[in-house]
Amino acid sequence: MSNHIHKGNWELIKNGIFSENILFRMAISLCPAIAVTTSLRNGILMGIAVLFVQLMVNITVSAMRRFIHPKIRIPIYMLVIAGWVSAIDMTMAAYARVAYKEMGLYIQLIVAFASILARAEAFASKNKFVPSMMDGIGMGVGFLMSMIIISFFRELLGKGSLLGIPIVVGKPLLIMILPAGGFFVFGLLMGFFNWIDIRFFGGKGAGGAR
Amino acid sequence: MDFNKLLELIISASLINNFVFTRFLGLCIFFGVSRKMETAVGMSITFTSVMVISSALSWLIFSYIMVPLDITFLKIVIFIGIVAAFVQSADTIMKKTAPTLYYKLGIYLALITTNCIILAVPLINVREEYTFIESIVFGLGSGLGFTLALVIMASIREKLELANVPRPFRGLPIAFIVTGLIALAFTGFSGLITL
């Protein structure tokens, strides 16, 4: 029995990372994926912040699901999300000051993430504590990994460095860290993942591919 | 009140620091409703009006309630509450008083709460310490900028439907690449005005 539950939890995590990946499959919460991915460090910090908020919101909503009246559930979810975002916002302002200066606004805007509200509404409000926790971890890790992939390419190509350490000698492609480059990298990566899905797994691809 | 300053604010919010192309906000809505011209126009009208009113409301509440009570650290919670409450009440009022308008624009109202620009504008207003008039003008400018972005994108995507795009790139991936090209064009506006 415990083995069965364990497998279920693992499936939930895998679901968040691959088949329902927030960025590349669902294509929601796109703003920070392009705004803060100019360097790998910022991408990782943002990913961790979202992982934290997603996990805590799922846990809180799941624990309180019996007490929340269904008619006023959306405003209550918003309040829960805003509370946890304020917490991570103040923590980052205190401990990661340099990064906070660049991405403070985007940290605050985690409140308006469709993905966090959607998971609270669609999953955590209907499921028990442990599965909700696993779902939160899966969704958050999926987001973190996508952020790492995007910012890896943008920093490597745009600045010729990784985590601030110079790697490539020569002139970097400045366009990659310009606003436009973010859209290019994201579009190409999404197309690439669609291609893998269609070619090797017989899937349909995401984002309106027919 | 300096008229030049206000004009600069509008141009800066709508063109130079366009929310979609240089600050990357509101992308979910931007890609969601830019498939057809009709929905794009409906969304823009609703969005700009909500933007102006909510930046005025949040400025009033911030300056007259939150600053005297010294609870500015709650700004995220309170601003999202203001926007959600305002959108919900506009929805109800419109349904009763202007049903035809409601059937045209009602669905966009519901979508607006998940748009990050609507929360970003009050937060930026507070951070830059704009006055009441400046806040409203900033809200208007960002609404116009969003309208411009949506209309450009919708007209391109209507043509894109007919193009022969490689299968993995159909839909969103190609839309992203197109947006990248427009963003590249918008970098040309930088340096138009130095604030």
Image (cartoon, coloured by chain):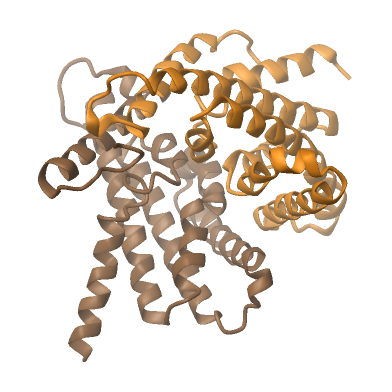
Chain colours: A brown, B orange
Extreme residue toward the left, this view: A200
| Residue A156 position within the rendered picture, expressed as x and y whole percent measured from the top left | 22, 30
The structure residue drawn at horizontal position 32% and vertical position 52%, both measured from the top left corner, is A21
Question: Residue A206 is drawn in which quadrant?
Answer: top left
The structure residue drawn at horizontal position 46% and vertical position 54%, both measured from the top left corner, is A115
The structure residue drawn at horizontal position 50% and vertical position 81%, both measured from the top left corner, is A63
Quadrant of the snapshot with the N terminus of chain A:
bottom left
Asked whether residue A159 appears in the rendered view, the answer is no
Extreme residue toward the bottom, this view: A1
The structure residue drawn at horizontal position 58% and vertical position 58%, both measured from the top left corner, is A86
| Residue A23 position within the rendered picture, expressed as x and y whole percent measured from the top left | 36, 46
Tell me if residue A60 comes above or below residue B130 in the rendering: below
| Residue B99 position within the rendered picture, expressed as x and y whole percent measured from the top left | 80, 44
Quadrant of the snapshot with the C terminus of chain A:
top left
Tell me if residue A3 comes above or below residue A46 in the rendering: below
| Residue A166 position within the rendered picture, expressed as x and y whole percent measured from the top left | 20, 30
Question: Residue B50 is drawn in which quadrant?
Answer: top right
Judging depth in this view, the residue of A133 and A45 nearest the camera is: A133
Tell me if residue B79 comes above or below residue B1 in the rendering: below
Left or right of A127 in this view: B138: right
